[in-house]
Image: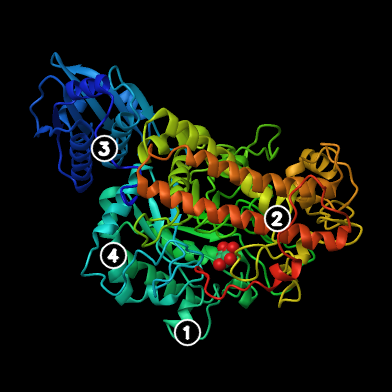
Amino acid sequence: EDGYRLWLRYDQVNNRVLLKQYQKTLQHLVIEGNSPTLQVAAQEAMQGIQGLLGKNLSHSATDIKNNTLVLGTAASSEVVKSLQLQTQLQGLGPEGYLLLSTKHNGKKITVVAANSDTGVLYGTFHLLKLMQMGQSIQNLNLSSQPKTSHRILNHWDNLDRTVERGYAGFSLWDWHKLPDYIDQRYLDYARANASIGINGTVLTNVNANSLVLTEEYLLKVKALADAFRPYGIKVYLTARFSSPIELGKLKTADPLNAEVRQWWKDKVAEIYRHIPDFGGFLVKANSEGQPGPQNYGRSHADGANMMADALAPHNGILMWRAFVYDNNVPEDRAKQAYNEFNPLDGKFRENVMVQVKNGAIDFQPREPFHPLFGAMPKTPLMMEFQITQEYLGQGTHLVYLAPMFKEVLEADTYAKGQGSTVAEVVDGSLYNRKFSGMAGVSNIGTDLNWTSHPFAQANWYAFGRLAWDHALTSEQIADEWLRMTFSPNPQVVSTAKNIMLGSYETLVNYMTPLGLHHIMGWDHHYGPGPWIKDKPRADWTSVYYHRATEKGIGFDRTKTGSNALEQYAPHLQDLYGDPKTCPEKYLLWFHHLPWDYKVSSGRTLWNELCYRYSAGVDSVRQMQEQWQQLEGKVDQERFKQVKSLLAIQAKEAKWWRDACLLYFQTFSKRPIPAELEKPEHTLEYYQKLEFKFVPGI
Ligand code: BDP
C-alpha cells in the first residue's frame, strides 16, 4: 500500500448487507451525451462500482431497465429532462447536483442530475462516496452546490521543478516533456481534485518567472489545460509584473503606460488563442522583492486593473495578493496589508479578487483572522490558506488543518454587526459579491503518496471540502477522509479521528502557545529559532515578534503599542484590547505582559508557557500511543510510515519545547516548574544546530 490512491481507493465493501443493497440498486448505467466530462463521469462510475461492488455495470446510451444509474443534464439526457427536475435544478447553479432515487416509466432508477457536465461529475463522486462510507443509497433525495465560485490550488512550483515550501518531492509538472508527453499523473491529479470540487489550479510560483508566458511554455500550459478540462479544472498562471520588460523588451512596466497596457492585452489574447477557457492570473507584487506598480509610483489597484482590463474581454479573472510588505521595515508588519489595501476598496475592476492570507503576518501556526476580512466591502476577498505545512512541521508532523481553517472561517468580523463571519465575507454572501473564492497553497509533489506524510493528504482533502462547503465540521471531514483513505473499521475511524482532531492544538502548544508567532528557524523555517535576530530586516527576525525582556513577553498591539488592533471592528478592539477578555490563544499576539501575569488557570504567564509547551509534547506521545493501537487494523506499510513520522514529531516537539523554554528563561529568570520534564540539552546546543539541506527553500 503506497497511498497513491488517496481517498479514491474503491476497495470492495465489507458489509454484506450494504453490498447487497448497492449491487441490487446499481445494475446498469445509462449516460446520454458524450462530452469528455461525461465520459470521465461514466468511467469513474464504472471504475468505482467495479471496485466497491466487485462487478461491472452494463452500459448503454438509452435503455432504461430496473435498477439503472442515470447520469446527465437536462440538456444532454432525455431521461433527466422527462423527470421534470427544472425547479430543483434551478437553485443549484452551474456546479451543483442532485442525487435522486426515483422511477422512470415504472422502472426504479438512481439519478445524478445537474445543470452542467461538471456538476454531473461532482454528483457521481458523491454517489461513490456514499458507498465508500457505508451509507444507504436507497431513497436518495439530496443536493449540493458550492458556496464559493473559485476553489483553487496554488502551486508554488518553479519551472526547474523545485517547489517553494514543498515537502513532497518535486513539481508534478514535467515541463521538459510537455507538451508532447502527458503523464498519467496529471489525470490522476485532476481526478482527485474534481472529487473534492476544486475547479482551478495556478500552476506556477507566486515568486514568478516570466518565462512561463513565452510561446514555448504556453504550449506546455495548453497541454495541461487540455488534460484538466474534462475534470472541470481551469488553469491559471502567475504573472510577473515586469514581464513587459523581460519578454517585451519595453523600457518600463508602468501600468499606466500605453505600450505596457497593450503588451499585456496582446499577451493575454495570445494565451486565450491557445487556452480559450484560461482562468486568469495570480499576482504577487511589491512584496518580498517582487516587482510591482509601486516601482512606478502607482498603486496596487493601478497594477491589478491593468491586467484585469486585459483579461476582461476573455472572461478571465485577476487574483491580486494582499501579502505585501515593502522595503521600509514597519513598526508592525501586521498592519501593512490593511494600510495599503483598505484605502483601495472600490477601486478595483469587477474581475479582480484580492487574495488575503488567513492572518496578517504569514501562515503562522496560529493567527487571528486577517483584519482585511470585513474591511473591504466593495471588493471580493479570496481566502488564502497554506496547505503545505511550511511553519507547521513541514513533511514530518501530523497536523490536521481543518480545525485551523474553520477557526478562521468562523471568526466573527462584526463588520455588519454580530454574525458577520469571515466565511460570509469569503463566500460573497455578506456583501452580495458575484465572485468568491478560496485558494490553498498546495502540498502536492512527486512523492508516491502525493503529500509525503500520509495524513497530509487529509489537508488537501479538507481544503477542497471547505472551499465547497465551509459549514462542514472538521469532524465530518476527518470522518469521510478516514473511511475512504484508511478503513471504515469503527476503531480505526474513532482512534485516528481523535488523533487528527487534537493535532492542531497540540502543535500550537509545542510551537507557539498563547499567541506567540514567528519564532521559527531562520530561512528554512524548520524547528525553533526564538533567538533569531540581526538579520537584513527586523521583521524577518523572531525577537521583533516575541519582544521578550526581563520584564515580560509579547507584542503590544493595543493603543499603548502598535495599535494594530484598531484595524478590527470596535467590538473586537474592546474584547482583544483587554488581556482579561482577550482569548488566551491570542494573548501574546496582542499584549506584552509581565512574566508574573496571572492567566485564567491561576498560573503565572511563565509557568503557563512551561505547561503549554509540556502539554504539547505529552499530547504527541499520546498520539503515538493511540496510533500504536491500530497496528494490524490498518495496512502495515502506512502503519509503519506514520509510526516513524510520529517518532520524529515527538522528538521535535521536545526540541521546540526545550529550545523555546531555555531561551525564554534567559529573560524570565524563573525555574521550569519542578513537576515538568527538564530540557535535555543546553540552550547553546539548540542554537548551534544547523540545517543545510532542508527541502522547500
Ligand atoms: C512565505 C514563504 C515564502 C513565500 C511567501 C508568499 O516563506 O516562500 O514566497 O510566503 O506567500 O511564508 O509569497
Which amino acid type corresponds to the residue marked 2 in the rendered image? Arg
Separation (CA) of disc 2 from disc 4: 48 Å
The earlier-in-sequence mark between 3 and 1 is: 3
Q: Are marks 2 and 4 in contact (CB under 8 Å)?
A: no
**What secondary structure is found at the residue carrying circle 4?**
helix
Question: Which quadrant of the figure shows ligand 1?
Answer: bottom right
Residue 13 percent coordinates (x, y)? 26, 30
Question: Which one is nearer the viewer's eye here, 412 or 275?
Answer: 412
Would you name the residue on which mark 1 appears?
A: 250
Separation (CA) of disc 1 from disc 4: 26 Å
Q: Are marks 3 and 2 in contact (CB under 8 Å)?
A: no
Residue 525 visible in the snapshot: yes
The earlier-in-sequence mark between 2 and 4 is: 4
Look at discs 1 and 4 and give the one toward the viewer: 4
For residue 141, above or below residue 162: above
Would you name the residue on which mark 2 appears?
A: 657
Separation (CA) of disc 4 from disc 3: 34 Å
The earlier-in-sequence mark between 1 and 4 is: 4
Look at discs 3 and 2 and give the one toward the viewer: 2
Would you name the residue on which mark 4 appears?
A: 222
Question: Is 105 left, or right, of 95 in this rendering?
Answer: left
**What secondary structure is found at the residue carrying circle 3?**
loop
Which amino acid type corresponds to the residue marked 3 in the rendered image? Asp
Question: Is 152 left, or right, of 177 in this rendering?
Answer: right
Would you name the residue on which mark 3 appears?
A: 11
**What secondary structure is found at the residue carrying circle 1?**
loop
Q: Are marks 4 and 3 in contact (CB under 8 Å)?
A: no
For residue 124, above or below residue 655: above
Residue 63 percent coordinates (x, y)? 7, 27
**What secondary structure is found at the residue carrying circle 2?**
helix
The residue under the point 53% across, 35% down is 498
Instruction: Rate crowding at label 1 as few (under 14), some (14 to 19) or many (20 or more) other CA atoms within 10 Å.
Output: some
